[in-house]
Structures are given as C-alpha cells and as structure tokens.
Image: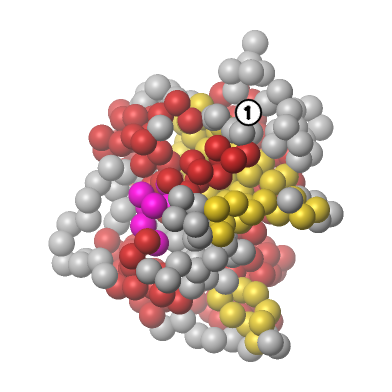
Amino acid sequence: MQNTSQYDDFFYSAQDGLKLHARVYGAETDALPAICLAGLTRNAADFHELALSLSTHPKRPRQVIAFDYRGRGRSAYDPNWRNYDVLVEAADILAGLTVLGIEHGAFIGTSRGGIIVHVLAAMRPGALKAVVLNDIGPVVEGAGLAQIRAYLERAPKPKTFAEAIAIQRAAMGQTFSALAEADWERMIRAFYREENGALVADFDPALIRTVTAVDLNQPLPTLWPQFMGLAKLPLLAIRGENSKLFAAATLDEMASRHPGMEQITVEGQGHAPLLETGDLPKRIAAFLERADPRTSA
C-alpha cells in the first residue's frame, strides 16, 4: 500500500490479471468494515468524505474500503469493454476482499454499486452483514437509464473545473436544488482528473458502450429474487426525492417485502444523493452501529 495523508492506496490483481485499486481508510477495528461501491462511471473518490466520517467516528470508528471498478479511477482499463459487467465487477470486489483478508462487512452501494450488492447476495451471501442501497433497488426505471445514456453520449468536455461545475449545475441544478457550491465542487472533482493540462472524465470511454448496448425498447430485467437474498439482513434504502432511476413505488414494494428495512428520502436531490451531505453521514453511521452484530448489545 502507498500511504497518503487520509487513506492507503491498495492495489491488487483480478483473476484475469488486471490491476485494480481501492482506497482503505483507517485501521481494522472491532466494528464491521464498510465496503463502498460506486455508480457506473464513478469511483472511490465519491465516498471520501463519508469514509473519513465513518473511519474517524469518535465512538465507533470502522475501517472503510472504497473500490475503483476496472476502467474507473486508478484501476486499469480493460481491453475488452464487455468485461465492464456487474458479474465480473462483483468477482473483482470479492477478489480484493480476499487479498485484504476481509470475510464480510457492511456494504454501501450507490446505483451500479447497489446492483453489484444484489449480485453478491446471490454469489456469496455470507459476505454481507448489513447493506445500504443508495438510490437503487431491484427495478431500474428505463427513463432514468435513458437520461444517463443521453448525458454520457453528449457529455461536454470542459477545460476547467469551474467550467465543469457550471455545466453540471446547468444540467442538474433543478434536480439537485439542495446542493451548495462546495457540494458541486466535490462531485466534479471526484468525476474528473487533470491530464496534460486538460480535464478528463476519470473512466474508460469504452464504458459508455455498455449503456448504449441496452435496448430501452424492451423491459429491463428486475432483481427481485436477488433482493430477497437481502431479506434477512439489516437494510437501509436511500432515495433521492427527484430520482428518475429509482421510483418511489419500488421503494414501497421493497419495504413490503422487507418489513425491517429502514429508509430515507433525501429532499432536493436526484440520482444519486451525495452521501456526505446533510445528516446522511450521521444517519448511516447510526444504522451501521445498530446493524453491526459486533457492536450491538
């Protein structure tokens, strides 16, 4: 691992040899580690503030591992774009946890990360001891996916971070009316990196092909059988009030199938809520403490 001031960079090899990366915040404690899984084109940086909050919690600090999927962040790009697949990515996460010596943890999945959590519930259910799903459930709304695809296909190429923030606010300001200037800046700085004096989206451009390959004229597959694999686990579902990807009706159905599920609707945010905003860090920390069999009395 390479030390930084706030986390360690952890590199490991996937089963096919691709070099992958994760951030490790804090040391191992008696609390369950939190495993953070980002959205489709996002990376470990999205969880930075939340990870700091959880790993330095004054009463119950816990180690946090935030993964970069293949083709995102500091993980290597895959020469075969078809490997940008949730089954492959789920196997990559399990490989990383094995190298780290982590048998199970509390999983926090945003969007695609939450879909991977559903897959892990089928692949290795014993790895999951508690789950936070951020703006994702067993049903993905086609309108929301179409919106994401349209944005990625027409994504502008800003020259500066200030320009990137202005573009993002113009496109998403009404959906994310609750965000302050600092929130927009954190979001953008996690999405782009500087390369040869220019801003570059921090993911493999070939990743967009996985979205354009989806036929939105056909019903999208649902994950209700996989969701039932979470039925006996402590579960917190977070939904952005303005989300078009995760419908309120799906959240209601999840609650009916998992009566013990806790839920939060984040006002003034869409897909997907920023987990470091408002009181979300405190509420997530409180949920994890209630859910943690190592710490609950």
Residue for badge 1: 32
Horizontally, residue 104 falls left or right of residue 188, namely left
Residue type, numbered disc 1: Leu
Q: At 66% across and 41% down in the image, what residue appears?
A: 64
Q: Is residue 264 visible?
A: no
Figure colour scheme: secondary structure
> Viewed as shown, does residue 209 lie left or right of 281?
left
Magenta residue span: 84-90
Residue 66 can be seen in this image: yes
Place of residue 262 in the rendered image (x, y in percent of width and height, measured from the top left): 48, 31
Q: Main secondary structure of the magenta part?
A: helix
* Residue 229 sits in quarter: top left
Position of residue 163 relative to residue 284, above or below, is below
Q: Is residue 263 magenta?
A: no
Q: Position of residue 31 (x, y in %)?
A: 68, 26
Vertical placement of 275 versus 42: above or below? above
Secondary element at image label 1:
loop
Give the residue furthest to the top. Answer: 297
